[in-house]
Image (tube, rainbow, N blue to C red):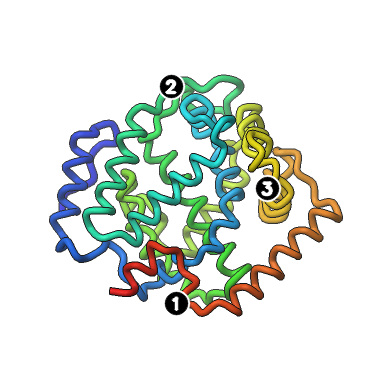
Amino acid sequence: MATMPEPSDSNAFIAYLEDLRSSLPPDAGFFEPGSMFWRVSREPVLLLAGMRALLLQIAHPGIAQGVADHSRYREDPLGRGIRTFTAVYSIVFGYRDEAIAAAKRVRHVHDRVHGEITGPLPSGMAPTYDANDPELQFWVAATLLDSAIVAYELFIAPLDDEEKEQHYQQARRFGQFFGVAPQCYPDTWQDFQAWWQRMLVSDTLTVTDTARAIYQGLIKGTWLTRLLAPFNLALAAMLLPERFRAGYGLKRQLWIRFAFHSIVGITRVLVLLTPGRLRGVPAARRREKK
């Protein structure tokens, strides 16, 4: 298999994806039903941690600026999340050609996402951003990875250390579809968690005015997001680490706590009442029927 090319070389990266394509027959996927990564990723309840993941993503100034400059988050506040999970599901649950096509679409979009970061920056951070930067890509992947485990354990069932390690080792292969080589990840789940905790307190992350403006757009942008606001506020306030909760001005008032525990309780009941074979996202169930 070819070596991961330099992030800036899009032609080489497309060639790398074609090399990945040639490693599988057309009727296979890069992730298999029954694997730990599949078992976790197939659960729709992971979407309930989507706001947590997004707010952590834009706590990186480079990602926040990219979203502000190149997305229509005020007019289409749900669009980025929908596109993100559509790509994720195509890569994780799709057949070979679907996964490669999704990775190419993401790359094509990211090739246009670059520019300068406005406002104060953490010490040592470059004043520019590029969506193909592996550091930014890895942070996005890391927020999805950590939030997936948080949601799974909250709504489905606890995972033991061995299950988390299996999930993590399989998840390390996911980043290669976005330009992050498996070796860029910490070696083990325990190592990843140590890195994650360091990142959460590092100067690299800060909730900027740009990030807060995006958050307000996500909450107030359209009638639908305003309708969903109490739901999203409760989930974000209760699932975000304290530093970021404060940065976005979220508080754990009594109604927030009540709403959150109601969401958790109702969701757990629905999970228990729904057979596992029917509970997965449609993209996963399609492959599982084969």
Tell me the number on the disc at residue 228. 3
Task: Identify the residue at image location x=24%, y=34%.
Answer: 10
**161 left or right, relative to 167:** right
Quadrant in which the C terminus appears = bottom left
Q: Which residue is mark 1?
A: 277
Disc 2 to disc 3, C-alpha distance = 32 Å
Disc 1 to disc 2, C-alpha distance = 45 Å
The amino acid sitting under disc 3 is Leu
Tell me the number on the disc at residue 115. 2
- The tag earlier along the polypeptide, 1 or 2, is 2
Task: Return the residue nearer the eye: 83 or 195.
Answer: 83
**23 left or right, relative to 189:** left
Task: Identify the residue at image location x=60%, y=20%.
Answer: 119
Q: Give x and y (percent) for residue 86.
A: 41, 50
Quarter of the image where one finds residue 11: top left
The amino acid sitting under disc 2 is Gly
Q: Give x and y (percent) for residue 58.
A: 56, 38
Tell me the number on the disc at residue 250. none
- The tag earlier along the polypeptide, 2 or 3, is 2
Q: Give x and y (percent) for residue 168.
A: 42, 64
Disc 1 to disc 3, C-alpha distance = 28 Å
Quadrant in which the N terminus appears = bottom left
Q: Residues within 10 Å of mark 1 (few under 14, many from 20)?
A: few
Going by the picture, which residue comes out furthest to the front?
223
**93 left or right, relative to 236:** left
Quarter of the image where one finds residue 76: top right
Query: Which mark lies nearer to you, 2 or 3?
Result: 3
Task: Return the residue nearer the eye: 132 or 95.
Answer: 95
The amino acid sitting under disc 1 is Arg
Look at the numbered disc 1 and give the secondary structure of its residue.
helix
